[in-house]
Amino acid sequence: QVQLVESGGGSVQPGGSLRLSCAASGLIFSISAMAWYRQAPGKERELVARINRDTTTTYADSVKGRFTISRDDAKKTVYLQMNSLKPEDTAVYYCNADIWVNRNSRSSPYWGQGTQVTVSS
């Protein structure tokens, strides 16, 4: 089955940086959009950034200018470079990818297990 595995989370001080990675593996025909979501305690999961097949991107207003999403299709990996981190960025970050497992089916969303990002002084 398809699996997404995140890495790169951790604890940093405000103003610090982290780089998250998410690698997809398994039987994959094609990957369309890839994205990062996050969920803080007591809050709904929210879209942080998305990158399409043509590399166009979408960012949440709260992270524009600070976060950068990118992808490496050869490695089936999506990255999230997070700079100028704020305490409000503290959350579990989840990788998402829309994937076709074969050419005659629809794409389906797949999720990673999440990686904790904590920003505090």
Image (cartoon, rainbow, N blue to C red):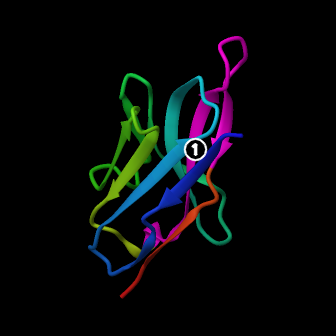
Check disc 1 and report the residue beneath it: 96
- On-image quarter of the C terminus: bottom left
**Is residue 58 placed above or below 39 in the rendered structure?**
above
Q: Residue at x 64, y 59 (%)?
A: 113
**Is residue 63 placed above or below 17 in the rendered structure?**
above
Label tally:
1
Q: Residue at x 27, y 51 (%)?
A: 65
| Rendering coords of residue 7 (x, y %) | 47, 62
Horizontal side of 94 relative to 110 (left or right) equals left
Horizontal side of 48 relative to 107 (left or right) equals left
Please state which of residues 80 and 23 is positioned toward the viewer in this rendering.
23
Q: Is 85 part of what is drawn in magenta?
A: no
- The image quadrant that residue 69 belongs to is top left
| Rendering coords of residue 104 (x, y %) | 71, 11
Horizontal side of 104 relative to 92 (left or right) equals right
Horizontal side of 55 relative to 96 (left or right) equals left
| Rendering coords of residue 40 (x, y %) | 59, 68
* Dot 1 alpha-carbon crowd within 10 angstroms: few under 14, some 14 to 19, many 20 or more: many
- The image quadrant that residue 106 belongs to is top right
| Rendering coords of residue 114 (x, y %) | 59, 61
- The image quadrant that residue 28 belongs to is top right
Please state which of residues 81 and 71 is positioned toward the viewer in this rendering.
71
- On-image quarter of the N terminus: top right
Stretch of the chain drawn in magenta: 88-111
Q: Is 102 part of what is drawn in magenta?
A: yes
* Kind of residue sitting beneath label 1: Asn
Kindly state the secondary structure of the residue where label 1 is placed. Answer: strand
